Amino acid sequence: MNTKDFTSDRRWTFFIFNAFLLAFGGIFMAARISAHGWTIAAAGLFVLFMVLQAQIVYGFTLAVTGWWLLRRGGDPVRVNLTLPPDAAPGQLPATAIIVPIFNEDVGRVFQGLRVMYESLKATGKGEAFDFFILSDSSDLNIWVEEEKAWFELCKQVEGFGHIFYRKRRLTLHHKSGNVADFCRRWGTKYRYLIVLDADSVMAGPTFVRLVSLMEKNPQTGMIQTYSRSVLGQSLFQRINQFAAYAYGPLFVAGANFWQLDNAGFYGHNAIIRIEPFMRYCAMPELPPSGKLGTRILSHDTVEAALIRRAGYEVWADYDLGGSYEEGPPHLPASVQRDRRWCHGNMQHVWFLFSGGLTRPSRVNILIGIMAYASSPLWLLFLIFSPVLFIGGNVPVQNTFLFVCAMFLLFVPKILATLHLISLPEQRRAGGGALKIMMSAVAESVFSMLLAPILMLFYTQFVWSSFFGGSVGWGSQKRSDEEGPTWGECLRIHATHTVLAIGAVVLVAWRLPAMLPWLSLVLAGPILAIPFSRLTASNKLGWLARRKGLFLIPEETQAPWELKELEEPFETSAGRNVPGGTGAEDLGLAQVVLDPEVNAIHVSLLHERQQMPIRTRERLIALADQLLRNPPSALTVQDKRILLWDADSVQALHRKLWDSPLSQWHPWWQEAFQNYLAAPQPQDAEIAEAEAVVAA
């Protein structure tokens, strides 16, 4: 798509409007400070104000621009318009769909895969696509469950040859390393790569449309979809998914106005032209200094900048539809995820001035950094803010600045709500105009309480990224029936609550004129413990849905894919080892005992080169030790070593079935008896698993 004729005009218009609004606020702030004279503290406050105001103004400009475009029928320059809506896809090139996973809910992941595979098959273009489940799971039980689920999925949808499972032996460099490993092994076999998250769902027509758009636009390196947050159960999830549904379209349309062919990449629910991605987007090592580490945790923004530097376009297809994901179930889970994201975004400081990047790429990187770095700046602003209350009064400038800030923050919400109500179909899907307005008001209160809580957490995270310890790559909590307990909420939020209460006491004593203003900020941390606990409630989420609040179209007019996703992933009976075996070693017991699970596991192990004699002797000793003792006698690492060796797994299986049971440890005797007493898989199922081994 040729955008050279108007790209410069759009960007100048957008950022001049930003600069005008920023200057307008800066003049009034300077006037307020000048009334009592400039000091070092006052100058610092002014600088902080301008930096933070720039971020608010940018969001306001995005929303207003997006609202203007949507009221006109949408931006005429967007990648989805390069093909007619009803264009029949031709023959599609080979495309890989990858799903990196790490200790995820196995049933949810594979049900999502089943839904997507069947939806894609229904388009008649499924032969062009292959699915790859790329596991870095460290839990041995989950590893075995993933293998079983892969085999079940392939049987259910006849997906052998199109659905593949790979477990990495060495889990280097987290998700980016997992994707890189796929590219090295299979990248040359495919023209396109569609990256999903473990909780992603995409409709079959969306897959086909993405590939067709890439074929139509050969200079496009990436197309990022706008994935809708869905299937929320807790109040926290439902409010967040309503906010994304109601306000998101304005912001993404506004972003497309100035970004155009230099959009961002979120790391999932996107399609990539794999050849330039492999050539130009390898993640570099960071300088080994400071606490930021040498490997990049948040790779997506950098990859978009690198492929754009190579001359390929990056587009956001924000109006495509059929792209979904799930959000964290509650505030503690959201904060846990943001801890890693924050550290990754802070690492992007190294790339701000990297050679050859386009200016929009640098802006995108800076926006990602400021999403977290603004929090400690806001905290500093609050510390310096008593400068505004010199003399113990509340001057007109203070009130005006406050009104301006509220205008910039709430007008986007008002415009989005009015736009939603103006669309008959969207209005009906949201429960009617009154319910939408009530939901928007409730979401605004929720956001006002949440923002200062996140400010304190993000300040800690930014500090830790530069001066604290390293950040691990833990599994994300995507669902939680019970939510955090009151005790957990107390442990997580107690420090912030105490600090907020202390700040209220101090301000009430020393500067009471400031208290009404500061109370808007401190209310969130003071109420953080009940706020976190109550918003995590599934019951309150269900009650809100019953009352028609925070509704989204995917609830009232759910597509087939989301309806199917809520069904459990069905597995054949008789493969579990029932009671008596420790839950922590269930996967190992299944691999050793069950012929079908044993065959599946062996079939998925990679061939190894000739093994040194000492290594083989150690494996034999470990296998013998395992059967003569309960599995708990071995370390997790020893169990993992055994499970990675096909000869050892097969030998353990044969020994347990061929030898007198009395010579093995009582733990195995009981497990074996329990296994024999359970319903067994049919001979045909075992034969099918063994055929996989032979193949």
Image (tube, helix red, strand yellow):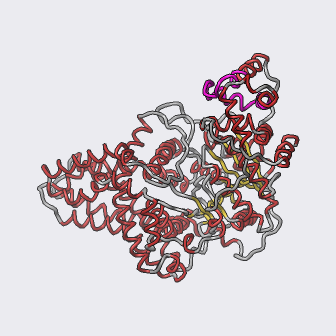
Query: Which quadrant of the view contains residue 622?
Result: top right
Question: Tag count in the figure?
Answer: 0
> Taking the image as drawn, is residue 312 in sight?
no
Q: Is residue 647 magenta?
A: yes
Question: Which of these two is toward me, 80 or 595?
Answer: 595
Is residue 157 or residue 295 the one in the foreground?
157
Quadrant of residue 203 in the image? bottom right
Relative to 99, is 341 on the left or the right? left
Q: Which residue is drawn at 57% across and 66% down?
A: 7
Residue 220 coordinates in the image, percent (x, y)? 69, 60
Front-lying residue, 28 or 626: 626
- Percent position (x, y) of residue 549? 44, 71
Viewer-side residue, 245 vs 411:
245
Image quadrant occupied by the C terminus: top right
* Residue plotted at (56% across, 66% down): 256
x, y percentage for residue 146?
A: 69, 45
Report whether 1 appears left or right of 430.
right
User: In the displayed image of the protein, which residue is found farthest to the top?
Assistant: 614
Q: In this view, does 669 lie above or below 686?
A: above
The magenta segment: 624-653
Q: In which quarter of the image is the N terminus?
A: bottom right
Q: Tell me if 617 is positioned left or right of 15 in this view.
A: right
Which residue is painted at 46% across and 62% down in the image?
240
Query: Magenta region, mostly helix, strand or loop?
Result: helix
Q: Is residue 434 above or below residue 409?
A: below
- Where residue 42 sits: x, y (%)? 23, 50
Q: Is residue 415 visible?
A: yes
Within the magenta stretch, is there residue 472? Answer: no
